[in-house]
Image (spheres, rainbow, N blue to C red):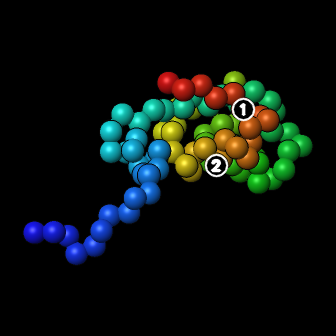
Amino acid sequence: MQSRWQHSAARTSLTSRRLKEGNMANLKITLKKSLNGRNKTHIATANSLGLRKIDDFTVQPDNAQTRGKIFQISYLVKVEEV
């Protein structure tokens, strides 16, 4: 029996392919510069990642939400794929 709807010919996104594979990478994020005198939203973003002091690090899943946070405070952090 054929499906009522045809599948799209568009390529699946990289994120959805990673989720299907199940071997999603993690990112090690290290705070390299102080949060003193920074924009309040940037401080809040760093705190949401679990970064409070210089050389604090956290391991987060590699997804769109985490990448967006890293992009916002990229001048404060160092990122490594784990």
Q: Is residue 57 visible?
A: no
Vertical position of residue 69 compared to residue 52: above or below = below
Q: Are circles 2 and 1 on residues that touch, CB within 8 Å?
A: no
Q: Could you tell me residue 5's position as x and y percent?
A: 28, 73
Number of marks in picture: 2
Residue 80: quadrant of the picture? top right
Residue 29: quadrant of the picture? top right
Residue shown at the point (89%, 43%) measured from the top left: 37
Marking on residue 68: 2
Q: Which one is in front, 49 or 81?
A: 81
Left or right side of 35 for 48 = left
Q: Of label 2 and label 1, which has the lower sequence position? A: 2
Q: Secondary structure at mark 1?
A: strand
Marking on residue 77: 1
Q: Secondary structure at mark 2?
A: helix
Q: Which one is in front, 2 or 20?
A: 2
Q: Could you tell me residue 19's position as x and y percent?
A: 37, 45
Left or right side of 37 for 22 = left
Q: Quadrant of the N terminus?
A: bottom left
Marking on residue 34: none
Q: Amino acid at mark 2?
A: Gly
Residue shown at the point (80%, 53%) measured from the top left: 40
